[in-house]
Amino acid sequence: MDLTRCGQGMVLLALVLAFFAFLFDDIPAALAAGALVFFLAARSAVFLSVLSSTVVSIAVTRTVSSRYIRRGTAVEVTTWIGHALRPSFSLHLTDLLPDGAALIGGSPADVSDSTLHYTLAPLSIGEHPFGGIRLTLSDPFFTTTLTDRRAESTEPSLTVLPASDYALSGKDLYGESESQTISPIPSPGIRSFREYLPGDDPRKIDWKLSAKHDTLYVREYMGRSDTAQLLIIDLPDASVPFSTKAFTRLKEAAVAAIATQLFPSPGIPVLLISGANLISFSPVESDPEKVITLMRQLSPAPRLHHLYRHASTPSLRRRYSPRNGGTGMNNGREFTGFRERSRESKNPGTAPAEEEFARTLAAVTGSFLSRRTPTTYEAQLARALHPLSTTTAHLFSLAEGDESHLRLLAEQATLRGMAVHLHIPEESYDLPTRAKMGRCSFASVEVV
């Protein structure tokens, strides 16, 4: 609680009278100073009582044009604030914007009828409640400012989805495996219609259907029949420095991919990993609240298990199989080349010796691999991928450090008939990373 200019003047007058009474021993001046102090004390008690009753009487009703929007989309807000205020007091109210929102029209400050009309644009993805109501109560002598952050004063929350700027590659727009029986709509290229969501491409609006029902509808075009594509997000290691800009771009691309598939797909399997650590695996239903829950989990995770130049048992069996020329690195190519050089050697007795060495090493390696158990990460991947029937998987990763976990993931998905498409931020896709990703069996690599 602060003093207004009038209150400060009365306090200054009381101090002057008290000093005058003390200096000249003037009783009337002392009584006048005491009267001013008593008046200010009584007025402050009344002010606090009015403040308490006013705060209790505040009722907030806030409506927004849409709760589920994409980043940068304009949202119209209407806030009605009811209160009971005594005469001779003034109350100034301000509606606090959500975090990361910018005011683009109107004013969130109080007007005479306590109804606020303004327009904002959210600039960050996630779930953002309003900041509450800021009230400033004042009378001729005192003023104070409080912030009401009760639940009813911060509702509703805005669910901000990323802008749909990241289209998933590796998916046919007009899939040959899809039939007309998916929808009774006669158009050969349209699966269905749905209500317009702020941020959707205006070119997809069907104006005839919208005019008929007086509601905006957008077209959903035909794609592959297996719309429930697997989305895999590789989170960076929290204990190792990484590019914040690259991870932000990766997170936006991943969430945008989920948001664009919410409506055409009844469920989206989402696998969260961090290196060789499986964080979670869950199908996300067509509910934006699930997307918000997922966005909260997209943060760097500590990696308890690490792999370094680890290869799966099937790949090692193929590499050291006698059918590949005995043994050797790089799927037998290295040793095969050595055998060819041995045949061309002047000493013809070296080739049989090398073949004998190859058979012995293949036998020793095969005996070791027969007792080799899969890692925890490989077993978890097998359990997660086994029940899925999708043929497309999209992997979002910074591809930092060793790529063993990505190679194992691509191998297991390929064995189950899944085409894995890698999405990597442009900040992370340098020449060494390009060479590492070339050793993995990805169907495509997209730089976002």
Image (tube, helix red, strand yellow):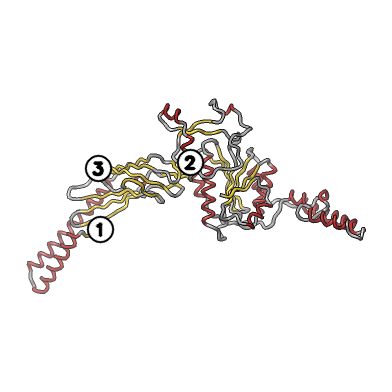
Q: Is the residue 293 above or below the residue 300 in the image?
A: above
**Percent position of residue 395, x then y:** 60, 47
- Determine whether label 3 and label 1 are within 8 Å by CB: no
- Give the residue drawn at x 55%, y 38%: 267
- Give the residue drawn at x 9%, y 67%: 29
Which mark is in front, 2 or 1? 2
**N-term mark: 2 or 3:** 3
What kind of element bears circle 1?
loop
Total numbered labels: 3
Q: Which residue is mark 3?
A: 113
Q: Quadrant of the N terminus?
A: bottom left
Q: Is residue 95 left or right of residue 186?
A: left
**Percent position of residue 163, x then y:** 48, 45
**N-term mark: 2 or 1:** 1
Q: Which residue is mark 2?
A: 288
Packing grade of label 1 (10 A; few <14, some 14-19, many >=20) is few
Q: Which residue is mark 1?
A: 1
Instruction: Inspect this view and state whether residue 429 appears.
Output: yes
Q: Is the residue 253 above or below the residue 354 in the image?
A: above
Observer-nearest of 236 and 436: 436
- Determine whether label 2 and label 3 are within 8 Å by CB: no
**Percent position of residue 117, x then y:** 31, 43
Q: Is residue 363 left or right of residue 139?
A: right
Q: State how far apart marks 3 and 1 are (Cα).
A: 26 Å
**Percent position of residue 309, x then y:** 69, 57
**N-term mark: 3 or 1:** 1
What kind of element bears circle 3?
loop
Q: As shown in the figure, which amino acid type bears the numbered disc 2?
A: Pro
What kind of element bears circle 2?
helix
